[in-house]
Amino acid sequence: MNVTKITEDIELVRNHVDLLQQQIGKLSLHEHQYKQISRTFATLHASLEKLRALDAIMIEELQKQQQLFEQIAESIPAILYVYDMCEQRNIYANRKLINILGYSPETVQAMNGTYTILNSSRRFSHSS
């Protein structure tokens, strides 16, 4: 599950809690029932706020890790190419592709299929 999806899910739950609270507010309840429900909603809201804070921290930490990864990937003197075999898609290619093979990371990202680097000829072959 990606970070954006988690953030969206938290907001969706919060919206549903708010809607449910509004609908319950329209019911005729005894005072002790209303107080009990109000405490439950206060707890739900507090929990959702904690989740939102944790989500923000998680996003910040993931961004820091991504920046560190990219700094390392761009500073190594070799090609770094990451391909997700399960999802059949390119994840990352560093700028050394241009220097060594003549392909930009964007060009490689746009290609579909399986890629093989032939070390002996330093050619980049593509098969669909």
Image: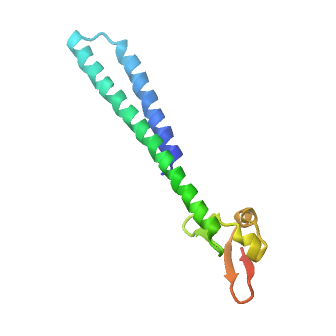
Q: Position of residue 63 (x, y in %)?
A: 54, 50
Q: Is residue 88 visible?
A: no
Q: Is residue 123 left or right of residue 16?
A: right
Vertical placement of 119 versus 17: above or below?
A: below
The residue depicted at 49 percent of the width and 40 percent of the height is 7
Residue most toward the right?
102
Q: Position of residue 90 (x, y in %)?
A: 64, 65
Vertical placement of 91 versus 35: above or below?
A: below
Q: Position of residue 97 (x, y in %)?
A: 72, 71
Q: Quadrant of residue 70?
A: bottom right
Residue most toward the bottom?
120
Q: Is residue 29 visible?
A: yes
Vertical placement of 45 versus 84: above or below?
A: above
Q: Is residue 114 left or right of residue 15?
A: right
The residue depicted at 50 percent of the width and 39 percent of the height is 8
Q: Position of residue 105 (x, y in %)?
A: 71, 65
Scheme of colours in the image: rainbow
Q: Quadrant of residue 85?
A: bottom right
The residue depicted at 30 percent of the width and 28 percent of the height is 43
Q: Is residue 25 left or right of residue 124?
A: left
Q: Is residue 82 left or right of residue 106?
A: left
Q: Nearer the viewer, residue 69 or 107?
A: 69
Q: Quadrant of residue 118?
A: bottom right
